[in-house]
C-alpha cells in the first residue's frame, strides 16, 4: 500500500532533530548505506532496508531521484520468508519417519525432535524466497513531518528503528496525546491541563 | 514529555472523545466546521461507525455499517456513555471529495480515497502525479489536524465541562 494506491493508510510522525551538512546528500548517503540488500541472504528469514519509490525491487537513489519538490519520497522494504506451517509439518513427519527407520527405534527424545524441526525449518528457509513488502513514506524536512503509508504495527516499528539507525533522528508517532502536545499549539497552561486530563464525565 | 507507550494508552480516550465531538459537530454545526477550511463544502458520516462503552472492566462494541445506515443505535449508545472509536467520513471541498476512516485511539487515517488524479502514463508524468497526491493528502491531514487542535483547546478549557459536554448529551437524547 503506498502513495499511488487507490486506498491508503497513513501513520503520521514528527521528526525530531536536524541533519548535518547538505540534506539531500546526507539522506542519499544514508539511504544507500541502509538500502535493502540486492542479493538475498539465503540463510536469513527477514531483511529490512530502504528502497526507492520508483523502483522498489531495484533500489536506486541516484540523481536525487527521491526528491519531489520540497519532499523526499522513498520506501521501507521488508522481505520476509513465510513458510506455511503445514509444509513444515509434512517435512518434519517425513524426516522423523526416516530417522526412526534409520535408527530402528520407536521414539525420539525431545532434543532430537527439536533438532529435526530446526533442520527442517532452516532447509525450507534456504529454498523458499522472501516475500517483499514495500511501504512508501513522504518526508517534508522543513516541517519535520513524515507520513508512513501503513498502519501495521510491525512495519511501523521497523520504520522507527531503521530511521533512527540511518539518520540518527527520532520519530515521534502522532497519536492523540502527541498531536495535542506537539501540533495543537497549546499554551503552557493548556499543556498542564492536558497532562491532568481525565475521561469526560459525560462519556463514562 | 511522557513515555510514548504510557501516553498512548493513557490518552486513548482523547481521540475517542474527539470523534464523538466531531460527529456532534457534523450533525449540528457544519457552519462552524467551515471556519477551519475556506474551501469546505461538507463533512458527512460515511458507511461505518464503531462505538464502544467501557464500564466496570467490560467493553461493549457497537458497529454500524452500510450506506445511509441509521445512526440511532449510535446515539442511544452515546446516551449510555459510549464514545466513537472509529468513523468513516466523506469530506468535500468545492471540487474534490475525500473518503477516509479515522481511528480514535491512534488518529491514524485509513482507507483513504483521494480525489481523482491524472494517470501515470510515462515516467515524465510521475513527478506531477506524486506532487498532486501529496498535496491532496496534505489537505486532508491538515484538515484533521486543524479540527483536532480546535477540539484540544476546547477540551482543556472549562467550556468543555460547562457547555460542550452537556450539549452533546442533550443532542444524543433528543434524537
Image (cartoon, grey):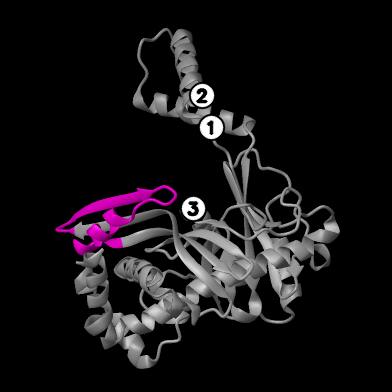
Residue B1 image-quadrant placement: bottom left
Read off the chain for label 1: A
Please say if the residues under marks 3 and 1 sit with CB atoms less than 8 Å apart: no
Q: Quadrant of residue A136?
A: bottom right
Q: Nearer the viewer, residue B144 or A112?
A: B144
The residue lying at 37 percent from left, 18 percent from top is: A108
Q: Secondary structure at mark 1?
A: loop
Write the residue at 71% across / 57% down: A53
Mark 2 crowdedness (10 Å alpha carbons): few <14, some 14-19, many ≥20: few
Pointer 3 and pointer 2: residues touching (CB < 8 Å)?
no
Mark identifier at residue A83: 1
Q: Tell me whether marks 3 and 1 sit on the same chain.
A: yes
In terms of depth relative to the viewer, which is nearer, A149 or A18?
A149
Q: Using residue A198 as the reference point, say whether residue A66 is left or right of it.
A: right
Give the Cα distance between marks 3 and 1. Answer: 18 Å
Residue indicated by mark 2: A87
Q: Secondary structure at mark 3?
A: helix
Residues indicated by labels 3 and 2 sit on the same polypeptide chain: yes
Q: Which residue is mark 3?
A: A154
Q: Are marks 1 and 2 in contact (CB under 8 Å)?
A: yes
Q: Is residue B63 magenta?
A: yes
Residue A63 in the figure: left or right of residue B19: right
Image: magenta residue range: B55-83
Amino acid at each position: 500500500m503506498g502513495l499511488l494506491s487507490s486506498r491508503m493508510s497513513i501513520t503520521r510522525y514528527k521528526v525530531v532533530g536536524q541533519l548535518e551538512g547538505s540534506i539531500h546528500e546526507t539522506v542519499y548517503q544514508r539511504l544507500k548505506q541502509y538500502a535493502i540488500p540486492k542479493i538475498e541472504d539465503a540463510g536469513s528469514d527477514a531483511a529490512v532496508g530502504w528502497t526507492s519509490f520508483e523502483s522498489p525491487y531495484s533500489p536506486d537513489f541516484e540523481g536525487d531521484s527521491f526528491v519531489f519538490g520540497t519532499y523526499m519520497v522513498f520506501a521501507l522494504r521488508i522481505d520476509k520468508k513465510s513458510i506455511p506451517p503445514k509444509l513444515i509439518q509434512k517435512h518434519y513427519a517425513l524426516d522423523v519417519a526416516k530417522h526412526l527407520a534409520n535408527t530402528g527405534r520407536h521414539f525420539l527424545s525431545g532434543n532430537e525432535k527439536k533438532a529435526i524441526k530446526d533442520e527442517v525449518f532452516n532447509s525450507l528457509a534456504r529454498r523458499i524466497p522472501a516475500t517483499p513488502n514495500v511501504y512508501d513514506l513522504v518526508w517534508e524536512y522543513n516541517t519535520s513531518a513524515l507520513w508512513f503509508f501503513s498502519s501495521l504495527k510491525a512495519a511501523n516499528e521497523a520504520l522507527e528503528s531503521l530511521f533512527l539507525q540511518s539518520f540518527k533522528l527520532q520519530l515521534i508517532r502522532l497519536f492523540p496525546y502527541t498531536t495535542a502536545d506537539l501540533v495543537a499549539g497549546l499554551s503552557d497552561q493548556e499543556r498542564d491541563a492536558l497532562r491532568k486530563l481525565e475521561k469526560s464525565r459525560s462519556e463514562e | 514529555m511522557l513515555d510514548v507507550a504510557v501516553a498512548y494508552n493513557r490518552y486513548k480516550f482523547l481521540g475517542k472523545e474527539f470523534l464523538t465531538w466531531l460527529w456532534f459537530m457534523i450533525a449540528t454545526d457544519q457552519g462552524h466546521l467551515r471556519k477551519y477550511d475556506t474551501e469546505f463544502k461538507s463533512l458527512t458520516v460515511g458507511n461505518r461507525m464503531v462505538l464502544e462503552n467501557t464500564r466496570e472492566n467490560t467493553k461493549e462494541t457497537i458497529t454500524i455499517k452500510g450506506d445511509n445506515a441509521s445512526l440511532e443505535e449510535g446515539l442511544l449508545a452515546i446516551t449510555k456513555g459510549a464514545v466513537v472509536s472509529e468513523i468513516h467520513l466523506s469530506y468535500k471541498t468545492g471540487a474534490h471529495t475525500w473518503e477516509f476512516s479515522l481511528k480514535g485511539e491512534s488518529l491514524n487515517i485509513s482507507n483513504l480515497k483521494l480525489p481523482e488524479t491524472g494517470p501515470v502514463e510515462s515516467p515524465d508524468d510521475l513527478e506531477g502525479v506524486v506532487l498532486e497526491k501529496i498535496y491532496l493528502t496534505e489537505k486532508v491531514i491538515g484538515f484533521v489536524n486543524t479540527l483536532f487542535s480546535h477540539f484540544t483547546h476546547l477540551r482543556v478549557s472549562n467550556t468543555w465541562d460547562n457547555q460542550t459536554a452537556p450539549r452533546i448529551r442533550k443532542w444524543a437524547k433528543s434524537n
